[in-house]
Image (cartoon, rainbow, N blue to C red):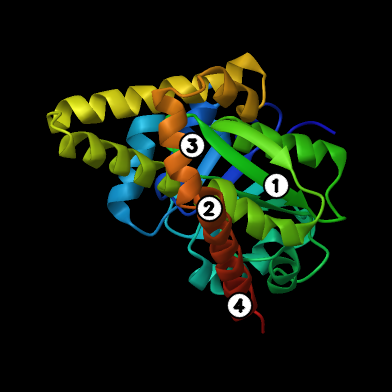
Amino acid sequence: MPSNPERPAPVHGFRVAFIGGGNMARSLVGALVRGGARADAIAVAEPNAELRAALARDFGVAVHERGTDAAQDADVVVLAVKPQVMKAVCGELAPALGASKPLVVSIAAGIRTAQLDGWLGGGRAIVRAMPNTPALVGAGATGMIANEAVDTGQRERAEAILGAAGRTVWIDDEALMDTVTALSGSGPAYFFLLVEALEDAAVAQGLPRATARSLAVQTCVGAGRMLDEDGEPPTVLRERVTSPGGTTAAALQAFADGDLRGLVARAVDAAAERGRQLSAAYDD
């Protein structure tokens, strides 16, 4: 069948529509365009006129006020709206998606695939994804779960979109998405808190704040690169820099005395439990 000349050119072979043009959608659009995707294969729906104008100006993508206009003829529809408005957005989109049945990718926290499928009319291919804010600088970590309607090609499309802004992993059990949210979704905030604490501790010892921040940030960046590039587990890397009776050993003992591992476990558990509560809140 000949192609329709009125349809936009494909992004790596497919057309994608973003419903919502906030920070996360913007980061994904930017990553796709920088990665060589055709801007004219990307459409974004965003009610805020200033955000629409910025997206069109910065990336050359088509922008719309209404989601139904952006989603027309899309092969993938990325739902990038707040969880509290997701049901209403899906209700508006359901008739427009019609028989085309595009892959639907949701990056909203706490909304399960079954909830999305019900709101979209049933029988939809849905990938639920949990990206994190480092996607804004191309260093994101995204956990994904696909429902049974998603085929291999659609998985590859989801990976192409989310992977443009960082690393992706597939999860087999949707219940574990709450753990993904607690680990990598909320994780950047834990990291920022640690850097704050290191900076404050060094300032209390007499270092100028600017110096303390620079050293703390670069130390964490370097340690992260070592974890990523060395290939050894964190236990091995920690042991390599911990001389018996040395300064690092003294600091680690203080962490142990304060039950750092138990505190982290309780924090991750609290975040995961809150995720489960939010999911339940959106049940009909």
**Where is residue 122 shown, x and y percent of the image?**
80, 69
Of circles 2 and 3, which is in front? Answer: 2
Which of the two labelled residues, at mark 1 and mark 4, occupies the earlier sequence position? 1
The amino acid beneath tag 3 is Ala
**Badge 1 is on which residue?**
144
Residue 30, quarter of the rendered image: top left
Of circles 2 and 4, which is in front? Answer: 2
The amino acid beneath tag 1 is Met
CB-based contact (under 8 Å), mark 2 and mark 1: no
Which of the two labelled residues, at mark 2 and mark 4, occupies the earlier sequence position? 2
**Where is residue 49 shown, x and y percent of the image?**
31, 54
**Badge 4 is on which residue?**
282
Which of the two labelled residues, at mark 3 and mark 4, occupies the earlier sequence position? 3
Which quadrant is home to the N terminus?
A: top right
In the picture shown, does residue 278 fall above or below 73? below
- Determine whether the residue tagged by mark 4 lies in a helix, strand or loop: loop
**Badge 3 is on which residue?**
135
* Of 204 and 123, the residue lying toward us: 204
